[in-house]
Each structure stands twice: as structure tokens, then as C-alpha cells.
Amino acid sequence: MDTPLGERKVMLALAANGSDLTGTISNGSETTAIQDGRADGDSASWRANITSPMPMTLEFTVSVTGDNMSGSVKLGMFGNAPLRGTRT
């Protein structure tokens, strides 16, 4: 994620069951379950409540093509930030 505090790398584990999306997001020191996860074809969305570097709710919207993901994340009151990821 390209945030106002610089690039933030996280590990994301997702599993889809129909349109339901579950998983976790981890920054190395904190792991949080995603909430309200939805999958629709090659698009997905979810929320995550984090406490570091400050408490806020992140709202993700992504598209997946093969092993690559791109989209945006709403960073609470700090607006939207682009994101990209690769399946490992």
C-alpha cells in the first residue's frame, strides 16, 4: 500500500467460498481478521480494523488478474491509497 506514511507491506491470506471472503491481514507484528469480505468474479472487497500505526478501519477494493492484485484502500480520514500485490 502506498500510504501517506510511505509504502506499507503486509501479508494477506484470503479464502473465498462463493461470494463470502474470509482471511487475515498481517504487518508482521499484528494479525487482524478481515470483516465483511465479498468476492464477485475477479473483484473483492473487505474491511480490517488495525491498531498500528494508529487505530483505524481500512476498506479494501481490489481486482485480481492471475497472480496479481491491484486496487485501493480507504485509510480512514486519510483518504484512499493505491495498492498492489502478488500471490506467493
Image: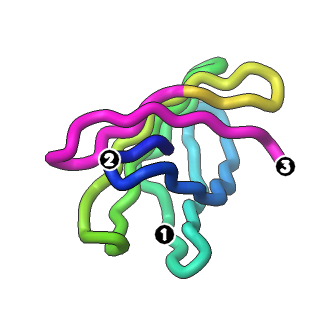
Residue 24, compared with residue 47, is above or below; it is below
Residue 52, compared with residue 45, is above or below; it is below
Q: Answer with the quarter of the image where residue 41 lies.
A: top right
Depth check, mark 1 against mark 3: the one in front is 3
Q: CB of mark 1 within 8 Å of CB of mark 2?
A: no
Q: Secondary structure at mark 2?
A: loop
Q: CA distance from mark 1 to mark 2?
A: 21 Å
Residue, disc 1: 32
Residue, disc 2: 4
Q: CA distance from mark 1 to mark 3?
A: 19 Å
Q: Position of residue 78 (x, y in %)?
A: 20, 45
Tell me what residue is drawn at x 55 percent, y 41 percent.
20
Q: CB of mark 2 within 8 Å of CB of mark 3?
A: no
Q: Earlier in the sequence, mark 1 or mark 2?
A: 2
Give the residue type that dot 1 points to.
Thr
Tell me what residue is drawn at x 59 percent, y 58 percent.
10
Magenta-drawn segment: 71-88
Tell me what residue is drawn at x 57 percent, y 44 percent.
21
Q: Is residue 10 magenta?
A: no
What predominant SS class does the magenta segment belong to? strand
Q: Secondary structure at mark 1?
A: strand
Residue, disc 3: 88
Q: Position of residue 3 (x, y in %)?
A: 38, 46
Q: CA distance from mark 2 to mark 3?
A: 26 Å
